[in-house]
Amino acid sequence: MSTATLAPVATAQRPLAVRLADSWAQTGLLIQWQLRRSAQSLPLLVLVQILLSVATIAGYGLLVGHPDHLAGLYLATGAPTVALITVGLVMTPQAVSQSRTEGSLDWLRTLPVPRGLFLVADLTVWTLIALPGLVLGIIAGAIRFDADLAPTWWLVPAALIVSLTSAAVGYAMASMLAPTVAQLMSQVLVFVVLLFTPISFPADRMPDWAQNLHAWLPLEPMAQVIRAGLAPHDFTVPGRSWIVLGVWCLAAVVGAGSALRKRG
Amino acid sequence: MDEVLRVRDLHKRFGRGPSAVQANAGVDLDVDAGQVVGLLGHNGAGKSTLVNQVVGLLRPDSGTITLAGVDAVADPDAARRLASVQAQANVPITGLTPRRAVELVGRIRGGRTADVRARTEHLIAALDLGPWANTPAEKVSGGIARLTAFAMTAVVPGRLVVLDEPTNDVDPVRRRLLWSQIRALADDGAAVLLVTHNVREAERVVDHLAVLDQGTVLAAGTPAELTAARSGHLSLEVDLIPGRQPHWPEGSTVVDRGHLRATTTVPAAQAAAAVQWAGDEQSAGRIERYALAPTSLEDVYVDLVATTEEHAA
Ligand SMILES: Nc1ncnc2c1ncn2[C@@H]1O[C@H](COP(=O)(O)OP(=O)(O)O)[C@@H](O)[C@H]1O
Ligand SMILES: [Mg+2]
């Protein structure tokens, strides 16, 4: 019987450059795996995401009619922010919970792939899913509220940080909590993000205690960086917000990574 | 031979207090390169728990696992680079086809594209997966999914290949093909740890066996060693008739196998007398059917496990 030659198994000690090249290739392959596995639901997810973002703009429009310049800016920048955050905080935990229940996650964990790469691959996929909704939401907002948006160059890295942080929080949540609890949590979070976070309105409309709470959560800083990135003439990001966001981003990535490494 | 896997005094307990389960209670196990080692044991014996500790999904309470010289407990990442695993649960691959899934996993495991392609085609042909290779995974049967999962493990095999019940749901014809591919993995130099219920079929493929029960290794050895104590004996298998009691020969020890089956051991010298007895019982309508066969590994296995069960009861 003829046997095709077996590829040699990677050994533990290899030069850093080789390991980096391998990691790069493996990340690409993992992304391919995830995208192909969700090929059927992917267009729908992106579509829902776009609808959510555009519909939020339309809904805000119905609620407020014709707002003044500043309120218009809040609404036009808030809707895409909400859409971006929900991908990470809602869709990511739902997908992770599902892959835990169906056994995908445990199988993936037996592959000879550094844990960090799973995270990188997954977060990339979720960011890709979120982007079309973000862009179309921004355009719809600018038109509906006649907002003179002037996106800056750093809007791109800022959006990536927001997407990364919310997806990592969602990922960590879904990896550490029981699937049913994680699902429930994510549904509560949509509500909080949509209505009780100063994303589409100024923070001073909230009671003091809520303002104090949001000073420590990552949601308000997320809204601030997107808002200021889209309308830099009207808004700036307080230095403190960058720090709060950065700390959350780091903590969430570390938390999600260690959840992946955990052994029962 | 080249030692690849070495497990010593492995302990793993789930939960605390009175409801705790001691899934592994001091397991020792060795697998060398070029060997297929069968791990037998009924449901809940602790087989999967052992496997999951080898690949770093579970952390042992105590004991050591050495994989090609690497401490697998301290460095699970390194262990995973040395092992490939087919888990007991099937891998969900909806959205992919068997061929795509095998190729992608081969490349994720670090195989070169051309090698992986060739090896994938080889496995698809060898397991007769051709008719299903390009079918979306949601339309393939459980057996084909199981074979695909095997191919995903064998496409770029590690120094150690762990197969947790690979033959489940696989049809008899393809099961033969699968057994020969399992053998081929070892012949190509891998150390193969094979978890199975299928004692009868495994017997022909494995070099070495360990019987696990309630977290401990009850017996270990080659199939010949394990059946040696019974050489010179035959096994008389009897299908019973509901409500009827056969008149067993004087002094025979009868083991009830359940499902209206019973067996007894007969010295080879008395084979003719045993057949005479069984024929008479059948004519008298006290047994349905009988068969006389050399003592199989399955008999030894069932006896081993049954004995501890009586002790436990
Ligand atoms: N994650 C777990 N939590 C609690 N108990 C478990 C877990 N995994 C296995 N067990 C228990 O440990 C014992 C051994 O299980 P397992 O290793 O799956 O057996 P096998 O694979 O031999 O059928 C069983 O009693 C099982 O219920
Ligand atoms: Mg099992």
Image (cartoon, grey):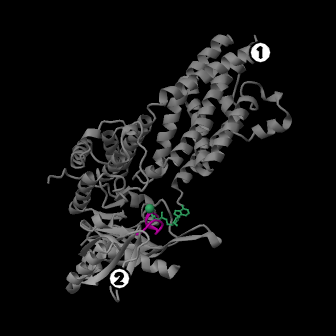
**Dot 1, crowdedness within 10 Å: few (<14), some or many (≥20)?**
few
A243 vs A32, left or right, is right
User: Is residue A261 positioned above or below B212 on the image?
Assistant: above
Indicate yes or no whether the magenta region holds residue B302. no
The three-letter amino acid code for the residue at tag 2 is Trp
What residue sits right under mark 1 in the picture?
A64
Tag 2, which chain? B
What residue occupies the far right of the structure in this picture? Answer: A208
For ligand 2, which image quadrant applies?
bottom left
What residue sits right under mark 2 in the picture?
B248
Please report the bounds of the magenta region as a residue range.
B41-48
Given residues A162 and B308, the one toward you in this image is B308
Indicate yes or no whether the magenta region holds residue B43. yes
What residue occupies the far left of the structure in this picture? Answer: A1
Q: State the residue at coordinates (33%, 41%).
A: B98
**Dot 2, crowdedness within 10 Å: few (<14), some or many (≥20)?**
few
Give the x, y percent position of residue A229: 63, 24
Give the x, y percent position of residue B262: 37, 74
Q: Quadrant of residue B183?
A: bottom left
Give the x, y percent position of residue A228: 66, 25
Q: State the residue at coordinates (68%, 40%).
A: A244
Tag 1, which chain? A
Q: State the residue at coordinates (21%, 44%).
A: B118
Given residues A125 and A4, the one toward you in this image is A4
